[in-house]
Image (cartoon, helix red, strand yellow):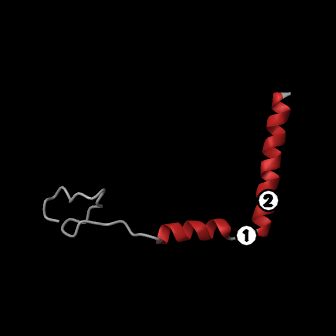
Amino acid sequence: MLLKIFILFLGAMAVIGLIGKALFPGAISRSVKKRAALAKPSRCRACGRYLIGKGGCDCGKG
């Protein structure tokens, strides 16, 4: 019985996904592109490593 409920749930989710993809064909790719273009990661000016957090770089120059 639990397996039938699980299969019905997955089938319903697939149908909802297909309907959503038919109604809004480019919505997912637009949101991913928008999120990726919001902010470029900051880098150290001296060595080029990515800066994580508000502290400076480990190289001591930037």
- Left/right placement of residue 11 relative to residue 32 reads right
Image x and y of residue 12, in percent: 82, 48
**Quick one: label 2, few (<14), some, or many (20+) residues within 10 Å?**
few
Q: In this view, does 18 lie above or below 38?
A: above
Quick one: which residue is furthest to the front in this view? 54
Image x and y of residue 6, in percent: 79, 36
Q: Is residue 17 above or below residue 3?
A: below
- Quadrant of the drawing holding the N terminus: top right
Residue drawn 76% across and 56% down?
Answer: 17
- Left/right placement of residue 38 relative to residue 62 reads right
- Left/right placement of residue 45 relative to residue 37 reads left
Q: In the rendering, which numbered label is found on residue 17?
A: none
Q: Is residue 38 above or below residue 49?
A: below
Q: What SS does tag 2 mark? A: helix
Of callouts 2 and 1, the N-terminal one = 2
Residue drawn 26% across and 61% down?
Answer: 49
Image x and y of residue 46, in percent: 18, 68
Q: Which amino acid does label 2 sit on?
A: Leu
**Quick one: label 1, few (<14), some, or many (20+) residues within 10 Å?**
few
Question: Residue under circle 2?
Answer: 18
Q: Quadrant of residue 5?
A: top right
Residue drawn 82% across and 54% down?
Answer: 15
Report the Cα–Cα distance between label 2 and label 1. 10 Å
Q: In which quarter of the image is residue 54?
A: bottom left
Image x and y of residue 13, in percent: 78, 49
Question: Residue under circle 1?
Answer: 25
- Left/right placement of residue 52 relative to residue 13 reads left
Q: Quadrant of residue 34?
A: bottom right
Quick one: which residue is furthest to the left in this view? 60
Q: Which amino acid does label 1 sit on?
A: Pro
